[in-house]
Image (tube, rainbow, N blue to C red):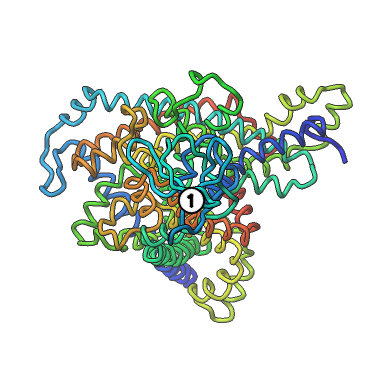
């Protein structure tokens, strides 16, 4: 009697649970599981979208590994990720430290630093295209006003050497979100620890290195992973600022941009799927590497 | 108050002011450029605040005023070939022809509002605003509805397999969108949904893992006793969801709604892939396409960029608390 009642409850719960989760189940199967498998299959196919996919084995991967633009786009992406992520973290951390000093007008400064991060990406890119204009942009105007020799004034988006630093500079403007994450984290750094260290004669720098940074390391690590994944998929700004081309001279043809071009401009869907899988594997391996090594430099305080 | 971080007070303030200026300057330049006439945008040194050319009415037409090297004010009658210009002194006198380079424009502070009026007609702004709002609003409805239902199923109903489903869902968050993008596109092509809003709206009704995760954490924090009391009063699961859990979760739902709205408003790749006809463009897509075609019309570009940005900033100021809570919540829990 008791058992069958329990069974009835179990069954009702199962039915209700599946019912409530049905949107997710449909979404997972239709928009994730099937597409993942299909994408893997397409990556071994010649698939111009208008005709059905035709199996070509490893041909896409072979072509990719012989494609100089593929390597260029990988190098561009690695360059961007290696520069934008650490610079973003350092800037955001510095801003958070400054705001954490209990200064007057903190809310105003916080807003100033945060608002750029919510500017719609396309509008922000158009704005920076103008700020970075080599001849009349605000940044070069300021550099000229500082009487920098003209050989040292960057051409930004007009110069293949400077186009990626230009995008990095723009990305640093948008670090407000990370700053808020750090600011919240800084509230949890124990004050008594700081006070005890101060009494023991620790300098501000020593307290920073031995107390603040260890306590903040989970937040720093989280943004490192997110920043890396975001940089690996960097697309919108490069597309908008170069009119979808990735110029000058392919210097801003990032991996995701080249993938998009293959898929939706050249209609090489199979080729693009092969690229997507390489992207996935790279992100997965790099994230795993970060997590594996994280035990060495991430300190999870008292939290168990 | 105790100085915790250790920088001397003065240095802190100087750093904050310098950095605050650097972060704010782009906005100032956005507005300033958007209010300048074309003739004053691409020049050195730039006008800090917008300047307009001074004009006079002479011989039946508005003419720009110029300053000659000897300090006389003249009206620019006509630009001639070879950089020459015909000018006429303002205090009455004969028309002369001189080198255009020698003349300096006479300017006064003033706003060129026509960048806005022209830009908004050009892109066409109101149609794109309508498209963007339709997509954003339906996406918000879909996301809140689907994510809250699923989060309820994953937190408040005890059923076999829910933890497996939860873990599977979390693991899909690792998947870059590029992997599924092409097969999903192929599905929407087969359904005949390309060049409609459906590919941008319908997926939101099938749940977003990240928001499901956020809401599930929030629902887990609502005491069991409340659901059990409602059950004794004869509520079914859906009744508990609608009458107990949803009303108590307004702050979390507001966060989800706000973030979804912003993401839909900003989305570029989705509309770029699925919307072909210009009349269906969203603001982001429209602005990008406009930039591609008229990349040099900075006055208009800045005006349109300002109009696309301002609603989001206004939204931020009205929802600051929800916003910042959401940001930090997602950061720590993620």
Residue B312's x, y, as percent?
A: 53, 57
Quadrant showing the N terminus of chain B: top right
Q: In this rendered view, identify the residue nearer to me: A149 or B54.
A: B54
Give the mark count: 1
| Residue A71 vertical placement versus B57 (above, below) | above
| Residue B135 vertical placement versus A296 (above, below) | below
Q: Residue at x 33, y 42 (%)?
A: B178
Q: Residue at x 45, y 43 (%)?
A: A125
Quadrant showing the C terminus of chain B: top right
B239 vs A183, left or right, is: left
B184 vs A7, left or right, is: left
Q: Chain of mark 1?
A: B
Residue B185's x, y, as percent?
A: 25, 52
Q: Which residue is mark 1?
A: B64
Q: In this rendered view, identify the residue nearer to me: B122 or B178.
A: B122
A16 vs A181, left or right, is: left
In the figure, residue A243 lies in which quadrant? top left
Q: Residue at x 28, y 37 (%)?
A: A259
Residue A140's x, y, as percent?
A: 52, 30
Q: In this rendered view, identify the residue nearer to me: A74 or B293.
A: B293
Residue A4's x, y, as percent?
A: 44, 70
Q: Residues within 10 Å of mark 1 (few under 14, many from 20)?
A: many
Which residue sits furthest bottom? B234
Q: Element at badge 1? A: strand
| Residue A255 vertical placement versus B253 (above, below) | above
Q: Residue at x 74, y 46 (%)?
A: A106
In the figure, residue A253 lies in which quadrant? top left
Q: Do we see residue A226 in this rendering?
A: no
Q: Do we see residue B232 in this rendering?
A: yes
């Amino acid at each position: 009697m008791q058992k069958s009642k329990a069974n009835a409850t179990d069954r009702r719960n199962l039915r209700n649970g599946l019912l409530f989760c049905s949107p997710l189940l449909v979404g997972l199967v239709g928009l994730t599981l099937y597409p993942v498998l299909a994408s893997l299959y397409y990556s071994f196919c010649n698939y111009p979208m208008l005709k059905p996919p035709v199996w070509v084995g490893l041909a896409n991967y072979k072509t990719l590994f012989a494609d100089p633009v593929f390597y260029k786009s990988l190098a561009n992406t690695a360059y961007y990720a290696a520069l934008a992520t650490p610079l973003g973290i350092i800037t955001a951390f510095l801003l958070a430290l400054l705001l954490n000093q209990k200064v007057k007008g903190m809310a105003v400064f916080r807003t100033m630093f945060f608002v750029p991060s919510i500017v719609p990406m396309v509008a922000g890119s158009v704005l920076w295209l103008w700020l970075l204009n080599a001849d009349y942009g605000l940044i070069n105007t300021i550099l000229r006003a500082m009487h920098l020799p003209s050989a040292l004034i960057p051409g930004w988006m007009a110069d293949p050497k400077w186009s990626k630093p230009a995008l990095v500079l723009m990305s640093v403007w948008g670090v407000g979100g990370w700053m808020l994450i750090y600011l919240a984290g800084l509230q949890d750094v124990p004050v008594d620890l700081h006070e005890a260290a101060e009494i023991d004669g620790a300098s501000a720098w020593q307290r920073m290195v031995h107390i603040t940074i260890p306590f903040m390391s989970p937040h720093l690590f989280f943004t490192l992973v997110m920043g890396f994944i975001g940089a690996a998929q960097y697309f919108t700004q490069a597309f908008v600022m170069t009119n979808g081309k990735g110029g000058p001279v392919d210097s801003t043809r990032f991996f995701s941009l080249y993938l998009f071009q293959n898929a939706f401009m050249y209609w090489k869907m199979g080729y693009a799927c092969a690229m997507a899988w390489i992207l996935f594997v790279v992100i997965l391996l790099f994230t795993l590497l970060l997590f594996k090594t994280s035990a060495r430099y991430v300190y999870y305080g008292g939290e168990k | 108050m105790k100085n915790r971080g250790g920088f001397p007070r003065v240095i802190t303030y100087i750093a904050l002011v310098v950095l605050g200026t650097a972060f704010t300057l782009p906005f100032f330049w956005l507005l300033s450029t958007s209010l300048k006439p074309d003739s004053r945008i691409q020049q050195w040194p730039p006008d800090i605040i917008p300047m307009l050319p001074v004009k006079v009415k002479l011989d039946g037409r508005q003419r720009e005023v110029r300053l000659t090297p000897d300090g006389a004010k003249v009206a620019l009658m006509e630009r001639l070939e070879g950089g020459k210009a015909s000018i006429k002194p303002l205090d009455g006198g004969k028309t002369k022809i001189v080198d255009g380079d020698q003349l300096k424009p006479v300017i006064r502070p003033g706003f060129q509002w026509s960048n806005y009026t022209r830009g908004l007609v050009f892109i066409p702004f109101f149609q794109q605003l309508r498209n963007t709002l339709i997509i954003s609003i339906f996406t918000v409805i879909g996301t809140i509805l689907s994510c809250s239902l699923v989060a309820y199923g994953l937190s408040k109903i005890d059923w076999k397999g829910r933890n497996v489903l939860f873990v599977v869902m979390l693991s899909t968050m690792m998947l870059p969108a590029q992997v599924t993008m092409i097969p999903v596109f192929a599905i929407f092509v087969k359904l005949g949904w390309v060049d409609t809003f459906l590919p941008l709206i319908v997926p939101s009704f099938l749940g977003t893992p990240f928001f499901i995760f956020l809401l599930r954490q929030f629902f887990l924090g609502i005491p069991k006793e409340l659901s059990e009391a409602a059950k004794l009063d004869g509520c079914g699961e859906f009744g508990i969801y609608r009458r107990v859990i949803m009303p108590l979760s307004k702050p979390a739902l507001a966060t989800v709604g706000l973030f979804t709205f912003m993401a839909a408003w900003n989305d570029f790749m989705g509309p770029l892939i699925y919307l072909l006809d210009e009349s269906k463009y969203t603001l982001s897509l429209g602005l990008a396409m406009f930039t591609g075609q008229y990349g040099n019309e900075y006055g208009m570009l800045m005006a349109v960029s300002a109009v696309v940005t301002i609603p989001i900033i206004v939204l931020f100021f009205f929802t600051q608390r929800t916003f910042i809570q959401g940001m930090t919540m997602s950061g720590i829990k993620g």
